[in-house]
């Protein structure tokens, strides 16, 4: 198995690049943002609870997302590997993910961090908000999401840096060039299918 965490602030291109990566390398995409939005649209109890946080640009409580990830991993036991997108976002989530994977006798192999300057992030998110229909893509909520990122998520990079798994890639070039830079790192572990 090969398991990758795609790391970076809101608007850094994690979603777009995850799609490219999973098709090129035949991996399984797990996006906690997508999973949560799906719960919200189906009006499940989990979705109703999560929506309160998402609409304010705050992180959903750790136990909610960790439970969701755990059942998602169990759904595809034969996967070549997983791309985690938007998870882990706190140190508690990172530790829980290590435990879950250890239980499955695997681990996180690589963490690719997308680096994009903040003004560019805000520009991208505001323009996405004009078409996405996402209730959290307004300027006020975007600012809150970036704040939450600096406060709670950025420290997760140190967690992975400490175990030598973190590589930073510039996410400010074209989608194709960014993908090339990400692939160069992934190719050290697995090759495209
Ligand atoms: P972005 O990366 O652009 O903020 P996401 O789709 O990843 O978008 O996340 C949207 C929202 O969903 C977040 O602002 C947060 O409320 C919630 N969320 C997603 N993933 C997590 C997570 N791992 N832990 C806590 N909350 C999460």
Image (spheres, rainbow, N blue to C red):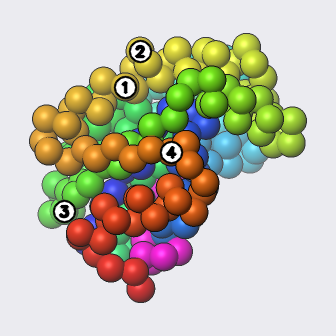
In front: mark 2 or mark 4? Answer: 4
Pointer 1 residue = 154
User: In the drawing, does residue 98 fall left or right of residue 123?
Assistant: left
Q: Which residues are magenta?
A: 23-32
Residue 106 bears which disc, if any?
Answer: 3
Looking at marks 2 and 3 on the same chain, the residue that comes earlier in the sequence is marked by 3
Pointer 2 residue = 151
Q: Position of residue 61 (x, y in %)?
A: 46, 25
Q: Quadrant of the C terminus?
A: bottom left
Looking at marks 2 and 4 on the same chain, the residue that comes earlier in the sequence is marked by 2
Residue labelled 3 has its Cβ within 8 Å of some atom of ligand 1: no
Q: Measure the alpha-carbon separation of dots 3 and 1.
A: 24 Å
Q: Nearer the viewer, residue 38 or 25?
A: 25
Q: Quadrant of the N terminus?
A: bottom left
Question: Badge 1: how crowded within 10 Å, few (<14), some, or many (20+)?
Answer: some
Pointer 4 residue = 171
Q: Are marks 1 and 2 in contact (CB under 8 Å)?
A: yes
Q: How many marks?
A: 4
């Amino acid at each position: 198995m090969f398991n990758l965490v795609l790391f970076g602030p809101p608007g850094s291109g994690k979603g777009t690049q995850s799609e490219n990566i999973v098709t090129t390398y035949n991996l399984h995409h797990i996006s906690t943002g997508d999973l949560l939005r799906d719960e919200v649209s189906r009006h499940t109890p989990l979705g109703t609870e999560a929506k309160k946080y998402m609409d304010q640009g705050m992180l959903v409580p750790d136990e909610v997302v960790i439970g969701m990830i755990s059942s998602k991993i169990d759904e595809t036991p034969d996967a070549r590997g997983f791309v985690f997108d938007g998870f882990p976002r706190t140190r508690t989530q990172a530790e829980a993910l290590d435990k879950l994977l250890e239980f499955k006798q695997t681990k996180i192999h690589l963490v690719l961090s997308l680096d994009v300057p903040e003004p560019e992030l805000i520009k991208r998110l505001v323009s996405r908000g004009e078409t996405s229909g996402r209730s959290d893509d307004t300027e006020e909520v975007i600012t809150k999401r970036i704040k939450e990122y600096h406060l709670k998520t950025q420290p997760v990079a140190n967690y992975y840096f400490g175990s030598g798994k973190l590589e930073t890639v510039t996410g400010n070039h074209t989608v194709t060039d960014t993908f090339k830079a990400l692939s160069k790192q992934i190719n050290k572990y697995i090759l495209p299918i």
